[in-house]
Amino acid sequence: MGKIRMSKYFMLVIGAVLSITYISASSNIVNNEVTQLYKLISLSHITYEKVIVGIKGVTESEKAPVEIIKMQKTAVEEALQKLGDNGNTKYCLTIKNEMRDKNTTVYNIEIQGIKELNQIDDMKDKVNKLFKDWHIQTKETISFIGSIKGDLNKQQKEMYKNQLFKSLQGKYTTSYQDDYNIGTIAYYGYTPFVEEYTKTSNGTKVNVQITFIYNEVQDTTQVIIAFPFYNAPY
């Protein structure tokens, strides 16, 4: 079967199930958030390969001139370079005017690593500060990608799910089982350790997604723990 990848259908159904509206509970940035979350979700038998921090923003009804975009790119890159580059942490930055809406500029940065969590936190905080100074409305996601050996059965997935929510002092809300890939299931809930959250149609807060995906070729179960949710295909 090869590596299992989440279908577009699965992502659409998840969105329909949650009926999410993204809410930022506070404009303040939590210091050392990545490091703190990593400590909370570090359980035996789960090996984490990387953490991905995504920060996306837009300026509505305000198109940035090309000269300003160049200056902003330079400012971000220089700020991150000053924090040190030992090859363990990577980032990808794009700032561009939206083609479908000529009055909107889109900002997107992805920071990725695992060995230097303090550096990732510093880079995340610096980017957020710059975006805030530029009056950019942002949304942020933090995703930890790991694995567990073997094909977990339903009881084992439930056990890990319960342990993770307990460690996060969180509350389990709902789940979704992929009809096409029975080895894929996503659990959703809320933790007070993350300020941002979404709200379901009935007003329930959600800011944690725990997903298990079985890889038959490697005989491992991929674990994705995302705050508030993981929206990339895999």
Image: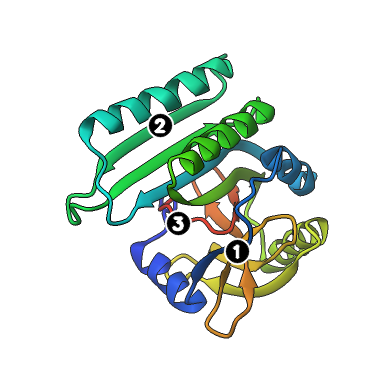
Name the kind of residue labelled 2 in the image: Cys
Which is nearer the N-term, disc 2 or disc 1? Answer: 2
Read off the residue under disc 1. 197
Which is nearer the N-term, disc 3 or disc 1? Answer: 1
Please name the residue shown 50% across and 22% down the image. Answer: 79
Give the CA distance from mark 3 to mark 1.
14 Å
Read off the residue under disc 3. 231
Which is nearer the N-term, disc 3 or disc 2? Answer: 2
> Residue 137 location, x and y as percent?
45, 52
Give the CA distance from mark 2 to mark 1.
25 Å
Please name the residue shown 24% across and 46% down the image. Answer: 63
Q: Is residue 3 visible?
A: no
Q: In this rendering, which labeled residue sits more in front, label 3 or label 2?
A: 2
- Taking 99 as reference, is 45 left or right? right
Please name the residue shown 51% across and 75% down the image. Answer: 18
Specify the quadrant of the image occupied by residue 227. Answer: bottom right
Read off the residue under disc 2. 92
Label 1: element kind: strand
> Residue 113 location, x and y as percent?
57, 30
Name the kind of residue labelled 1 in the image: Tyr
Q: Are marks 3 and 1 in contact (CB under 8 Å)?
A: no
Label 3: element kind: loop
Give the CA distance from mark 3 to mark 2.
17 Å
Name the kind of residue labelled 3 in the image: Asn
Specify the quadrant of the image occupied by residue 52. Answer: top right
214 vs 56, nearest the viewer: 56
